[in-house]
Image (cartoon, rainbow, N blue to C red):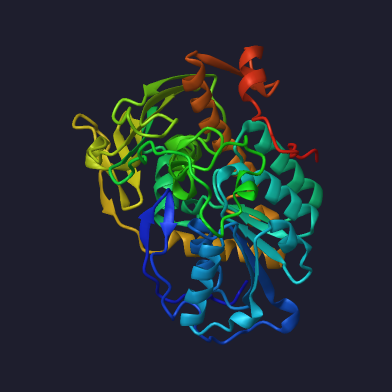
Amino acid sequence: MSNRRKFLANATRFAAGGLILSSLDNNVFATRKNPFSPADQINVAAIGINGMGWADLRSAMKIPGVNLVALCDIDKNVLDKRMAELAKANVDTSKVKTYGDYRKVLENKDVDVVIIGTPDHWHCLIMVEACMAGKDVYVEKPVGNSIVECRAMLDAQKKYNRAVQVGQWQRSQQHFRDAIDFVHSGQLGNIRTAKVWCYQGWMHPDPVVPDTAPPAGVDYKMWLGPAPTKPFNSSRFHFNFRWFWDYAGGLMTDWGVHLLDYALFGMKADVPKTVVALGGKFAYPELAQETPDTLTTLYEFEKFNMVWDHAMGIDNGQYGRDHGIAFVGNNATLVLDRGGWEVMEEKNSKNKVSKPRVKPSDNGLDKHMENFISVVRSRKMEQLNASVQVGLDVATVAQMGNIAYRTGKRVEWDKAAGKFTDEKVNAEYLAKPYFNGYSIPKV
């Protein structure tokens, strides 16, 4: 689009591997000049609005010509809260339909775009069905909850030719892209190791608590969907779903898909040859989570190694930062995180490549949504900054790390066959079984 988009200021905070908007200020949905004709309006619905789905929607609503027409969540308490926030921001809520079942959203012919902000175990089914229904899709990361799911989602995007953006918003933030341009310039020299780490002091799993009845207003059966049927437990619900294998993959698939993505991007790599991982519930063995609170994973590529290191409950990560990517070269090391990037020169290097820290100058989530909406209009799929293929590549690498941890093996990947060399590992972990009458989509 030639028209420059005007974005309104917003208050943000970092959380849960993305930007969570802490409150709804009136400017976000303020009346604005709309350069688009009625035929060019884009009607958006959001499915799963307790966290990043709401943040994604807020960014979408800053773009002229984008209209909110529907909200969907299995928790009526969340729906009521969001509708109250809209009303407080002077949005005409009479034009916004609410649903507890995502299938009703997909049946709505007025909906052009669907934002998916559900727990991970729902991403594949809703995204594939949305493509089948002729909707364009913005789906939160990780793109799928297993390697097989990711492939089904790519197949659906291709078959139905829908614009699908994965919520890896760092792909659209300028300082991340500038840092990768520097890596690709060759000035670091040969890069032997890409280090990726995530230390999250604020992330503490919840305690072990008794099972209870679901809270009033929660459709727990729908929340479970294809996951195994288990009694409701508050320590597995809402934000905490991340720490249980039935629904997600812990920090590896939560923050990992953001950070590993940029390591792969910088190294122009796709999948490793072998993976080994060590970790466990070392810091909080008494708490409720299943996924490891401490994990170190070594990925072997052809000409370099990649190391993933995560820790819950502490912040003192590498280079004094709680998260980041470091490209370790012969001449210098480039360190990149959400707060900026810098180049630290080797003291004996003859090439003067040091660079002081460059801080962010834009809002990555807003730019990511702008990129998506521009492609929805242009239909130029190659211009998406985080296509399903991008999401598939890094989600596969993250899943491989978790699989190495769970098997306790050094797993080897057969790239030509698209699977592990160990058929027992493939049988148990390449796909996650579906329950309750659901099945992995056949596209």
Residue 31 seen in the figure: yes
Residue at (61, 53) in percent of width and height: 219
Residue at (76, 40) in percent of width and height: 441
Q: How many marks?
A: 0
Q: Pinpoint residue 309: horizontal percent, then vertical percent.
A: 36, 30
Q: Pinpoint residue 154: horizontal percent, then vertical percent.
A: 70, 42
Q: Relative to residue 203, is residue 293 depicted above or below?
A: above
State left or right for residue 190 relative to residue 231.
left
Q: Relative to residue 222, is residue 77 depicted above or below?
A: below
Residue at (43, 81) in percent of width and height: 26
Q: Quadrant of the N terminus?
A: bottom right
Q: Pinpoint residue 100: horizontal percent, then vertical percent.
A: 65, 60
Q: Relative to residue 149, is residue 22 depicted above or below?
A: below
State left or right for residue 135 relative to residue 415.
right
Residue 302 seen in the figure: no
Single out the residue that lies furthest toward the left. Answer: 347
Q: Pinpoint residue 10: horizontal percent, then vertical percent.
A: 40, 72
Q: Relative to residue 80, is residue 196 depicted above or below?
A: above
State left or right for residue 373 relative to residue 238.
right
Which residue is more in the foreground, 249 or 227?
A: 227
Which residue is more in the foreground, 365 or 283?
A: 283
State left or right for residue 7 relative to residue 191.
right
Which residue is more in the foreground, 386 or 282?
A: 282
Q: Quadrant of the C terminus?
A: top right
Residue at (51, 63) in percent of width and height: 78
Which residue is more in the foreground, 332 or 234?
A: 234
